[in-house]
Image: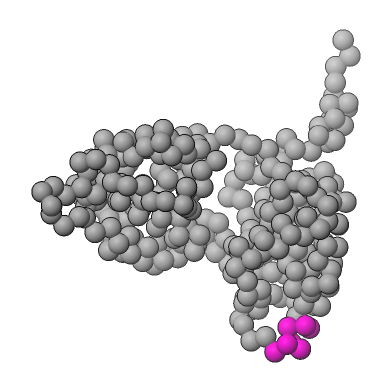
Amino acid sequence: MASMIAPGGRTPRAKPGGGAEGGARPFSVSPVVDRFTRMLQAQERSPCTVKQYGHIARMFLSYVQKPLENVAPNDLDAFREHLVLERHYSKNSVYTTVRGLTCLFRSFGLATAEQLEAPRRPARLPHYLTEEETHRLFEAVRDSSRDWAILHVLGYGGLRVGELCRLSLEDVDLSQNLLHVRSGKGDRDREVILEEKARAALDRYLADRALAHEGSARLFPVSPVTVERMVRSAARRAGIERHVTPHTLRHTLATTLLSHGCDIRYIQKLLGHASVATTQIYTHVDTNALREAYRRAKPEY
């Protein structure tokens, strides 16, 4: 599956005939991309969105080799064809590209991309761990108070990895055992309960931070990539052969809460979903609950 951030590790070359003619100076992509990323930052988009949309803009402009105001709908269609047929983009990657291009043109007051339709993304069931596997994952990092705290906050709080890395010390309310998640997906703030085991893990980590005289204002001064690598490494040490990411813990929490009888509306609020329809995917995951519901309601023919 193609990656959106750096698909193939290359920037596509300009299509034949798309650039300047007669030896004229080629179109300069960087000023437009730089202006676009500043616009996104001013809108307080997440760093991930800024990076992703900036890459999409650079890739597209390098392909068409013309100013945005000169781009026609057929240029967008040709670029989309290029991504699907030549770069073998998945539906998810094309969907994100279309979103990025629509944002690019709108940001510059142009309606060129308004008719560009995003494909319907395939609905895939989320991957999650069993409670026993999650326990083993935690145990694999017990010797590191930082990693121990990170996994407990992810596993009991359901945070996205970007949200975790943006937490500041001021976002931790130990008096009420709450985490204040600022500007989550969709620019929505929410409060997350700090479960007692997660609180204990955090207390241990904060005590070690104080001894080390760590002065960062961020709760966990690490990048999402660092957290992802740590989780993968912990999964290997725990003997979990499946691919495990920080987001797997978010899915695991939602699935476990639902199987234990938690109301789906509370799970929606905890995860920060705008619509309960997003949360309902977890109702298709818990096969034990499905079996029990079927056993109680099945007809007797």
Q: Which residues are magenta?
A: 207-213
Percent of width and height locating residue 110: 26, 49
The secondary structure that most of the magenta stretch takes on is: helix
Residue 224 visible at all: yes
| Quarter location, residue 87 | top left
Instruction: Residue 184: give x, y in percent of width and height.
Output: 57, 60
For the rendered model, the colour scheme is one colour
Give the image location of residue 33, x and y in percent: 33, 60
Q: Which of 102/213 is in front?
A: 213
| Residue placed most toward the observer, 256 or 188 | 256
Left or right relative to 147: residue 32: left
Q: Residue placed farthest to the front in the image?
A: 23
Residue 211 highlighted magenta (yes or no): yes
Picture quarter with the C terminus: top right
**Residue at 32% in and 47% down:** 13
Quadrant into which the N terminus falls = top right
Residue in the picture at 66% in, 73% down:
220
Q: Position of residue 69 (x, y in %)?
A: 20, 50
Query: Viewer-proximal residue, 4 or 101?
Result: 4
Instruction: Give left or right: position of 17 versus 248.
Output: left
Residue at 63 percent across and 61 percent down: it is: 161
Residue 146 lies, with reference to residue 248, above or below; the image says below
Image position of 249 (left or right of 53): right
Height in image: 33 above or below 168?
above
